[in-house]
Amino acid sequence: MKHIKIFDTTLRDGEQSPGCSMNLREKIEMAKQLEKLNVDIMEAGFAASSPGDFNSVKTIAETMKSCTVASLARAMQGDIDKAYEAVKGAVSPRIHTFIATSPIHMEYKLQMSPDAVMDSAEAMVKYAKKYVSDIEFSAEDSTRSEIDFLAKIFDRVIKAGATTINIPDTVGYTTPDEYYDFLMAIRDKCPALDNVDISVHCHNDLGLSVANSLAAVRAGATQLECTVNGIGERAGNASLEEIVMALKTRKDIYQADSRIVTTEIMRTSKLLTRITGVGVQPNKAIVGENAFAHEAGIHQDGVLKNKETYEIMTPESIGITEKSLVLGKHSGKSALRARIKELGYDINDEELEVAFAKFKDIADKKKQVYDSDIEAILTKETVKVPRIYTLDRFVINSGNTITATAVVSIFKGDKKIEKVARGDGPINASFNAIEKIVNRKFHLEDYKLSSVTEGTDALGDATVAISEEVEGDQKPIITRGRGLSPDVVQASIIAYINAVNKLLYEEEQNRILNGEQQD
Ligand code: KIV
Ligand code: ZN
């Protein structure tokens, strides 16, 4: 059985996509979960792209205990220097350098001749090799590049020290049959590829990224680049969970497997959703809400008689556990701690205190507390981000014949501040009241409300994304907050306050970081 290395780029290509940006703490939390999932390589970011990215790659590199940590770098000395500075503290550091090789990219984007691109690729791989032994080279837009040119450039960068050659479908243009033939043709023209890892990185513009990645395995690829939930530029990257489960389920075809701990898949997917607020569609393969739901009577009957009639893999294999009633309002802190541990989470005493307060609040209002409720309250953002503002109380006056009014009272430290505001509905009125209290204007980027479990007493799960008002073409900070409560207005208010706390915290962190950079 061939081992396929899983190169996760959730924190780089994934994080680049709209709505998926994460702050440092969120990236670290995600990175730790990716290590539990047992990815072979984690691309932690693009160190040269910003001081924030540099800092997160460096911190992740120093935190990971076993997996390889990579930073992306253009084929430029400055980028490679930054990438090395960021990953050098890793147990196993990798520099991933790239340059575009398609005629259209070379002519219009790079404005470089093919010879100059080839020279630059070779020189930069040599340069990076001074720093680390593990070098990945990517020929951006490979699938629209000329095979002879790719074969030559790969030959040169392999001689210069590249240990992994990535042949990406940057624009999601190829098809499985074409990609297979293309990769086989390159291997034929560049025998040196047999001595390195061949990697593929497929985008999903035509919905073929996973199929293309699997075709690449048949053509000899030994590393697949992918992201959790398939997030990434435009239509996203190949989805990690789909690739991994396809390899596992169809070993008979691929004669290959990954080292991913598949029972961590669902938890990883949910964590990403929780952090970014970007969910997956219900019918998404593997991790969608309906991926294991059998609705049709004939199907249900079959599954009851023998699961394999309609199930090609088990929900347990990706870490879905039976919905179980675990705790009630009389359960104590140690019972909650024990259950959290059983669910596979590691929390410290301070985090347990916060989780327990939330649990009590929910258990008081809700008859039944399920595992999914407990997992929902385990967001670490409320623990780590200083809670400058906290909700005291609110009163809403709303109806279909009046303008909604909200009275919101919030603590800032010991001080209670109360404001009244009107709005288009109770949620808008509450948000307006919070803005008055904080005395700032925010832009509402996104608002989502869903329920954690079923039933009329289900927990409402609100996510709010806000951004600061900025001048000119400055990039605004966008933060997300989450709130949970059986009362959806309360969940929304808590989410908004959490987003505000995070935004203030991020602004403060940026000020510190900029100050440090200037020193
Ligand atoms: O899509 C792409 O080609 C990339 C490269 C930088 C690997 O993300
Ligand atoms: Zn990409």
Image (cartoon, helix red, strand yellow):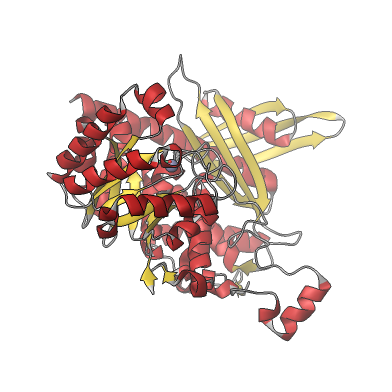
Q: Is residue 515 visible?
A: yes
**Residue sitting at x 44%, y 49%:** 182
Quadrant location of the N terminus in the rendered image = bottom left
Q: Quadrant of ligand 1?
A: top left
Q: Is residue 39 above or below residue 485?
A: below
In the displayed structure, 330 sits above or below 149; it is below
Q: Residue furthest bottom?
A: 305
* Picture coordinates of residue 75, whole percent (x, y): 26, 34
Q: How many marks?
A: 0
Q: Is residue 80 left or right of residue 294?
A: left
Residue extending farthest to the top is 472
- Residue 114, given in percent of the width and then of the height, sits at 31, 29
Residue 252: give x, y in percent of width and height: 51, 75
Which quadrant of the figure contains the C terminus? top left
Image spot of residue 362 (x, y percent) = 61, 59
Q: Nearer the viewer, residue 174 or 152?
A: 152
Closer-to-camera residue (246/180): 180
Please say whether residue 390 is visible from this viewpoint.
no
Q: Based on the displayed image, in which of its 4 quarters is residue 448 positioned?
A: top right
